[in-house]
Image (tube, rainbow, N blue to C red):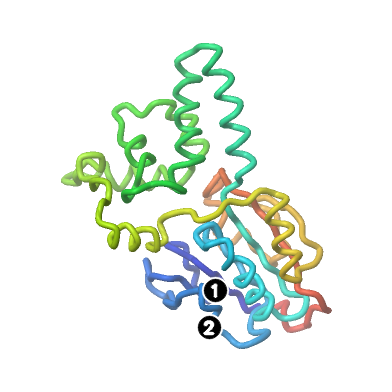
């Protein structure tokens, strides 16, 4: 089976063709995916993209999915993973009500929900309010935040607890005031430029031409033997990014017999 991972970040797998805007690990093809996927028509049997779509401007998202359709073989599988706007919005509303009713724990959880909902859309410095929150000693509502942020928070804490590493809050840059620097930061890939829920993501996939579009979870996939790649689920059954929304769809047409390899 020929597999493509678009926007792989640090999660490149040797059994996949891995493409990203910047190479964070070896074995990654560097390419601006806003310009299309650098592959021929019907080159892959499955395409996977996790936590990349929200970093594209909304007007680029449909074109990217159309290109995913182009490079897939008939019957090929697209698997998309994005932050779940509905889930974080529901968490925000729930903990807003609880915080208003009183209680220190509810107030701490509410503060995190606001950051999770807004910070990566609006931040004006690298890391934003999220890194500032994670850097507090002790971190408020730690168990709740860890359940929401998953392996991303664990990796942050490991990296910044290493001996000799500067505390991230102390090293954090000031707000960017120069207009040119701010424009570069907005295009750096750190910010979320749009968000999706179960309705908007399904409609986007269907509008791009995918069929049998369905919501799945971290361990459910039509991609054969998907779990062994540990892209969405880490060893021990730990979900890599628990705040995620998972969807899959198929390119119309019969699947080729060679896709089973």
Residue that appears at 25% across and 43% down: 168
Residue ID at (29%, 58%)? 179
Q: Quadrant of residue 178?
A: bottom left
Outermost residue, bottom side = 40
**At x 56% / y 31%, what residue is drawn?**
92
Relative placement, left or right, of 37 versus 141 is right
Residue at the image position 73 percent from the left and 53 percent from the top: 215
Judging by the rendered image, the residue that carries numbered circle 1 is 16
Q: Position of residue 8 (x, y in %)?
A: 49, 66
Q: Position of residue 105 (x, y in %)?
A: 47, 18
The Cα atoms of the two marked residues, 1 and 2, are separated by 15 Å
Classify residue 183 as left or right of residue 162: right
**Farthest residue, direction left:** 164
Crowd around label 1: few <14 · some 14–19 · many ≥20 (10 Å): many
Q: Are marks 1 and 2 in contact (CB under 8 Å)?
A: no
Q: Which residue lies most toward the top here?
A: 102
Residue 111 on image: x %, y %: 45, 28
Mark positioned earlier in the residue sequence (1 or 2): 1
The quadrant the N terminus occupies is: bottom right
User: For numbered disc 2, what is the local secondary structure?
Assistant: loop
Residue at which label 2 appears: 38
Q: Quadrant of the C terminus?
A: bottom right
Q: Is residue 3 above or below residue 229?
A: below
Q: How many marks?
A: 2
Is disc 1 placed on a helix, strand or loop?
loop
From the image, state whether disc 1 or disc 2 is nearer to you.
2
For residue 119, the mark is none
89 versus 209 height, above or below: above
Q: Residue furthest right?
A: 254
- Decide if residue 72 is on the left or right side of residue 232: right
């Amino acid at each position: 089976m020929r597999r493509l991972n678009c926007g792989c970040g640090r999660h490149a797998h040797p059994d996949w063709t891995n493409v990203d805007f910047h190479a964070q690990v070896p074995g990654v093809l560097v390419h601006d995916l806003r310009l299309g996927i650098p592959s021929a028509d019907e080159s892959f049997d499955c395409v996977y993209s996790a936590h990349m779509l929200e970093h594209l401007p909304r007007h680029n998202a449909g074109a990217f999915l159309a290109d995913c359709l182009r490079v897939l073989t008939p019957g090929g599988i697209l698997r998309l993973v994005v932050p779940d706007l509905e889930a974080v919005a529901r968490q925000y509303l729930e903990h807003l009500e609880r915080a208003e009713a009183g209680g220190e724990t509810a107030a701490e959880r509410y503060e995190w929900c606001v950051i999770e909902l807004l910070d990566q859309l609006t931040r004006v410095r690298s890391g934003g309010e999220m890194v500032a929150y994670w850097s507090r000693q002790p971190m408020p509502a730690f168990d709740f935040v860890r359940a929401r942020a998953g392996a991303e928070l664990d990796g942050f804490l490991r990296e910044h607890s290493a001996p000799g590493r500067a505390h991230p809050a102390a090293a954090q840059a000031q707000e960017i005031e120069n207009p040119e620097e701010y424009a570069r930061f907005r295009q750096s890939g750190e910010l979320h430029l749009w968000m999706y829920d179960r309705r908007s993501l399904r409609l986007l996939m269907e509008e791009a031409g995918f069929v049998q579009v369905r919501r799945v979870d971290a361990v459910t996939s039509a991609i054969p033997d998907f779990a062994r790649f540990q892209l969405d689920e880490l060893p021990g059954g730990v979900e890599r990014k628990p705040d995620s929304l998972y969807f899959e769809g198929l390119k119309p047409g019969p699947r080729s017999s060679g896709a089973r390899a």
